[in-house]
Image: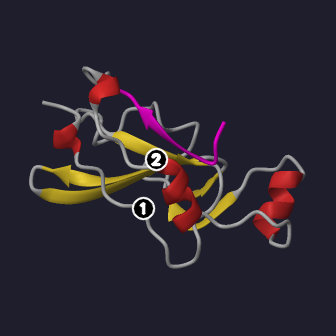
Amino acid sequence: MPALSFAIKCPIEDLQSKEWPDLEALATAVLAEGDGSSVADANAGAGSAVVHEGIDCTKTGEVVTGPLYHTRCQINHEEIEVNHTEATVLEDDQYNLHPLIFYRLAKPLKKGSELPPIDLSKFYK
């Protein structure tokens, strides 16, 4: 699986016709390089889960380890940010009624980087 991809819980009508962000360019801009020199790279190489330092799971409140499922979007005129682990992304939470689109990150973000918000109105009616 690529280091950066999308994950959805609700089907998107006419998925192929939608204009999606360029994930390859985005990954180059925001994901940490994997040169093996960091603890995260060493852990990933050893089969251990990558730790997304400073990012807590919305459901459990614990630091996200392993793939991070992240979204930032507008819900009811308010910007929300939701972070999940591989284990919690499919569980019910306070945002379950909304059709969220997540970025799935297998690598940590570069220090000071953030992913752009997702405009849900472009994907759901």
Residue type of the residue flagged with mark 2: Tyr
Residue holding disc 2: 103
Decide which of 119, 29 is in the foreground and name it.
Answer: 29
Q: Is residue 95 above or below residue 46?
A: above
Decide which of 121, 66 is in the foreground and name it.
Answer: 121
Please state, as top left, top right, bottom left or bottom right, where the N terminus lies in the image: top right
**Span of residues in magenta:** 1-10
Q: Is residue 85 magenta?
A: no
Residue holding disc 1: 115
Mark before the other along the chain sequence, 1 or 2: 2
Do the numbered discs 1 and 2 sit on residues whose CB atoms are within 8 Å?
A: yes
**How far, Cα to Cα, is label 1 from label 2?**
8 Å
Q: Which percent across, then down, holds residue 77?
A: 9, 56
Across the whole image, how many numbered discs are drawn on residues?
A: 2
Residue type of the residue flagged with mark 1: Leu
**Displayed quadrant of residue 100:** top left
Q: Residues within 10 Å of mark 1 (few under 14, many from 20)?
A: some
Check the image and name the residue furthest to the bottom.
112
Is 109 left, or right, of 45 in this rendering? left
SS for dot 1: loop
Q: Give the residue displayed 22% in from the left and 42% down from the top.
A: 120
SS for dot 2: strand
Q: Residues within 10 Å of mark 2 (few under 14, many from 20)?
A: many
Please state, as top left, top right, bottom left or bottom right, where the C terminus lies in the image: top left
Q: Which percent across, then down, holds residue 45?
A: 87, 53
Q: Give the residue displayed 64% in from the left and 49% down from the top.
A: 106
Q: Is residue 4 magenta?
A: yes
